[in-house]
Image (tube, helix red, strand yellow):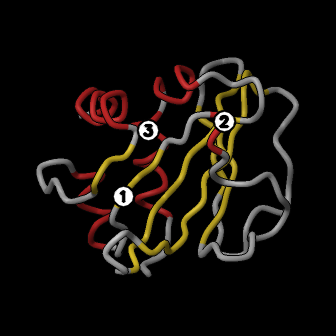
Amino acid sequence: MYESLIAMFLRERVMPTAPKDNPITARLNAKGYDFIILPPESDGGAPDVHGIPKGYTAYGRCGVYRDGQLFMIVGTQGSSEGHPSNLKWGGYWAAKPVVNKQGKTINVIEVRGRAGVSDDEIYKVAGPICEWISKKIPKV
């Protein structure tokens, strides 16, 4: 399941939530989210803030502990805590509405690492991160 999700990320970096054969994307689509975006480090994406950033509907932190376990926090109020000190790497995820080229508002989820985290590190755990978000994120 994760392999096909990650392969889509690696090929496009923007993944529609429409494929109903994938339970992760189907769950996100049912909650009103249209795309998952893994921006490269230089493209910005989910900001590093405490609380929910302006213009976003949900926000949290993510990462991988040194023992390989996933670290995730979520909330419609955002993240009031920083990353734990025993992480191998940390990152951020956020949900927000954006207006596409056709003028339609769509809802997207962004996932990015902190400075110095390679895109490859994000891709390795993209499936589990998106699965966790899909179960916790509120419907829009």
- Residue in the foreground of this view, choosing between 86 and 55: 55
At label 2, the amino acid type is: Ser
Above or below for 129 versus 18: above
Question: How many numbered circles does the render carry?
Answer: 3
The vertical placement of 98 against 21, above or below, is: below
Which residue is label 1 attached to? 35
Residue name at image x 48 percent, y 30 percent: 125
- Residue 107, position as x, y percentages in the image: 43, 71
Q: Give me the C-alpha separation between circle 2 and circle 3.
A: 23 Å
Question: As shown in the figure, which amino acid type bears the numbered disc 1?
Answer: Phe
Return the residue found at the far front.
101
Label 1: few (<14), some or many (≥20) within 10 Å? many
- Mark nearer the viewer, 1 or 2: 2
Picture disc at residue 128: 3
Query: What x and y, as percent, mark residue 76?
Result: 64, 75
Q: Which residue is mark 2?
A: 42
* For marks 2 and 3 on the same chain, the one whose residue lies earlier in the sequence: 2
Q: Earlier in the sequence, mark 1 or mark 3?
A: 1
For the residues labelled 1 and 3, the Cα–Cα distance comes to 16 Å
Answer with the quarter of the image where residue 2 lies.
Answer: top left
Work out whether residue 56 or residue 78 is closer to the camera in this orientation and state it.
56
